[in-house]
Amino acid sequence: EAIIKIANENIKNGNRSVTESTKHHLPFTLSITFSWSMNHNINIESGLNYSFLSSEFIKGRADLGFVDNQKIHYIGIPLKLSYKWHETNRWSIYSSAGFVMDIPVKSYVDTDYMFKGKSLYYESEPFNAPIQWSTGLGVGLQYNFTPQFGIYAEPNIYYFIPTDSEIETYRTEHPISISIPIGFRLNW
């Protein structure tokens, strides 16, 4: 009934064709990272990432059509190797290379059937998002408060490896992305 009401209103307003628009929001990632020294210059790093991706797909108009809000929550496992190029008492400059495996833990689409700016009907459907692999390179600057604890900034370039899925996200639209993580690091 909601679909027929929306279609009749579009025809009444002269909207005989349905347009589609897509907006992928910037992903949000939060990480906890641990670094182990293999020797004075080489470290191996791992931890856990939480990433949230959301996209909006509008069929028709936002006030008279169908609005799908796609949301994917990932838990990621990074593995990275870094090499210290320069180190003083407190500061170090390094480069890194590695990969991340993002495992989807919850993915769903919320759909609103919009009629004159109000939702006539709402539904939420889960779906199976694929595992997302990525590779990355970075250069970092770290300030150590103690030998085991520091703060860092590490500009990275990531390549998100295409999946066989037809699911569209920010990562499928922008497979090469730049990020500048800033955080705290525990060293062993």
Image (cartoon, rainbow, N blue to C red):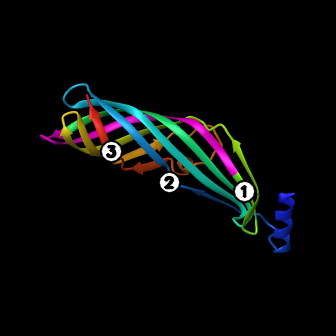
- Marks 1/2 in contact by CB < 8 Å: the verdict is no
Q: Amino acid at mark 2?
A: Leu
Q: Amino acid at mark 3?
A: Gly
- The residue wearing badge 1 is 112
Q: Is residue 187 left or right of residue 131?
A: left
Dot 3 lies on which element?
strand
Give whichever of discs 2 and 3 has the lower sequence position. Answer: 2
Q: Which residue is mark 2?
A: 26
Could you tell me residue 137's position as x and y percent?
A: 36, 41
| Outermost residue to the bottom | 13
The image quadrant of residue 63 is bottom right
Span shown in magenta:
86-110
Instruction: Give the residue type that dot 1 points to.
Output: Asp
**Which sits earlier in the primary sequence, circle 3 or circle 1?**
1
- Give the vertical position of 94 relative to 116 (above or below): above
Badge 3 crowding class, 10 Å Cα cut-off, few under 14, some 14 to 19, many 20 or more, is: some
Query: Which residue matches tag 3?
Result: 183
- Name which residue lies at 29% across and 38% down: 185
Q: Earlier in the sequence, mark 1 or mark 2?
A: 2
Of badges 1 and 2, nearer the viewer stands 1
Compute the Cα span from label 1 to label 2: 22 Å
Q: Secondary structure at mark 1?
A: strand
Circle 2 residues within 10 Å: few <14, some 14–19, many ≥20 = few
Question: Could you tell me residue 54's position as x and y percent?
Answer: 57, 50
Q: Nearer the viewer, residue 81 or 148?
A: 148
Asked whether, in this view, residue 126 is left or right of residue 87, the answer is right
Q: Nearer the viewer, mark 2 or mark 3?
A: 3
